[in-house]
Amino acid sequence: QRGVVGCKMNFLGVPDWVILVVTALVLLYLYAARYRNYWKEQNVVHENFSLIFAAGKRMLFKPFHRMDQDRYLQFGKLFGVYEGGNPMLFVGDPELVKLVLVKDFPSLPNRRMINFFDPLLDNMMSMVPAEKWRRIRPAASPAFSTGKLRKMNNLIADCARKTAQHLEETAEKEGELDLKQFYGNYALDVIAGCAFGTRLDSHTEETNEFVAKARQAFSGKITPRLVFFFLLPGLAKLLRMKSFDSDSFLYFKNLSLQIIENRKKSQSRQDDFLQLMMDARDGSIAATDEISTSTDEKLFNLDSEMKTDTSFVGGVKALTEDEAMAQCVLFFLAGQDTTSSVISFTLYLLAIHPEIQAKLREEVDDCFKKHGPEPSLDVVSKLRYLHGVVSESLRMFPPATRLERSALSDYVLGDTGIKVPKGCVVAVPVYSMHYDPDNFPDPTTFDPE
C-alpha cells in the first residue's frame, strides 16, 4: 500500500505538483502560441514568431515609427508580424488602405482594444468598442462642424496674438527657445478656452494649477508600470493593472464638474465643448444640426476626396457622466500635443529652408495687403502655399505614425485572400507610407509644391 501511495506522489522521483505546474505551463504555451505558423500557412511575408519579449523589447529601445519603418523596408507594403503571440497585419498599399479605413469599415470598426481600468480613459471615444462609439460620436461631432469652428476662430486668434507678443519679447532676449513647450502653451490656451471656457496665458501663468496639471499629463515619463504593460499586456490585463497614473486626468474631470455646477447655479451657457457634453449628458442634443455645405467641405478639406460624414444625423442618446467627462479629457489630450508638434515641426522646416519661408511670407503679406491685418477664416483657407507647407510638414512629421483597426469577426482583405482572425489588429504604417518613394518622390525633401 505504501508503494502505491509512493507512485501517486512521485513519478520518476518528481513530485506531482511539479508535473502539474509543468503540464499547465506547456498547455498555456501551446494555447498562447497557437498562431505561431499563421502567416506562414497563408504564404504572407512575415516576421519570425515571438510570444512575449521581442516586440516589447523593441518598443523600449526604438520609437514605433522607426520600428515600423525597419519592417516596411524589409518586408514591403504588406506583411505580417506577431504581437503578444497574436497575428497582426500591416497594410501599406494605398488601395488596400482605402479598404481597411473606408470601404470595409463595418468589418473593421474598432481600434486596438486596450483596457486602462480607468473610467475616464476607458470611455474615451477613441477607446470604446464600435457599438458604444456610435452612441458617443454624434454628441461630439457638432463641436467640429464648420459653424462651431468659425465661432472658435476669434478665441483662437486672441490666443495667437498673445503668443505672437510673447514670441516678440522672447526674440529680444538672448538665448534659445524650446518651440515645443512654447507652442504647447499656445495650444493649452486654445483648448482651455474652446473646451473648458477658461481663459489662460500659459506663457506667464507657470504656477496656474490648470497649466501644472497639463504639464504633468504630458510629461512623457516611462514608468516601470508602463514598461510592464507593453511587455506583458495579457498579464497586465489579467492583473487589471493601470498603465498610467490618472490623477492628472482626474483633475480635468473634477474641473469640468465644477464648471458644470457653477453654470447650473447661474443658469448660464457657453459656446464650448464642455457645454456640448453637458447637453449630451442631459440628453438635450436633438441631432447634429449643422450639416456642412459643399463650400464648407472645401474650407477645411482642400484637395481631399473624402466627404463630410452625415450618417449620424437623426438624434443623440444621453451620455453617462463618465462618458461625457471622458470626451472633455480626450479633447484636451488629442489637441494639445498634436497641435504643438505640428506648429513646432513646421517652424523648424521653415527655419532650415529660408527660400520656402520667403515664398510663404510673400503669400501671407499679399493676403494682409488685400484683406487687412485680420483676414477671415475663409480667406486664410484659400492660401494654397500655406496649406502646402503645413501638409508637407504633416507628411514628414505625422503626429499619428500608425493607424490601427481591429477585426469585428474573421476578416478577409480584399482580393488578397489574406485572413485576419477576429479581434486581431490591421495596422497602417502612416510614417512609412509617407517616406515611400512610390507615394512621394524624393520623400526626405521638404517640398510644399
Image: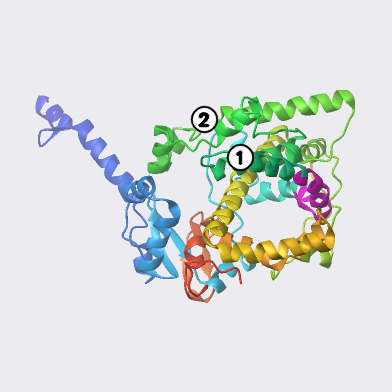
**Residue 99 in sight from this viewpoint:** yes
Q: Nearer the viewer, residue 48 or 158?
A: 158
> Which comes sooner in the sequence, label 1 or label 2?
1
On screen, residue 263 versus residue 42, left or right, reads: right
Q: Quadrant of the C terminus?
A: bottom right
On screen, residue 54 versus residue 117, left or right, reads: left
Q: Identify which residue is drawn at 86% across, 53% down.
A: 289
Q: Position of residue 190 (x, y in %)?
A: 71, 41
Q: Nearer the viewer, residue 78 or 375?
A: 375
Looking at numbered disc 2 in the image, what kind of residue is underneath it? Asp
Residue 206's place in the image compared with 51, above or below, is: above
Residue under pointer 1: 170
Residue under pointer 2: 245
Q: Identify which residue is drawn at 67% across, 50% down.
A: 131
User: Badge 1: how crowded within 10 Å, few (<14), some, or many (20+)?
Assistant: few
Residue 380 belongs to the span the image colors magenta: no
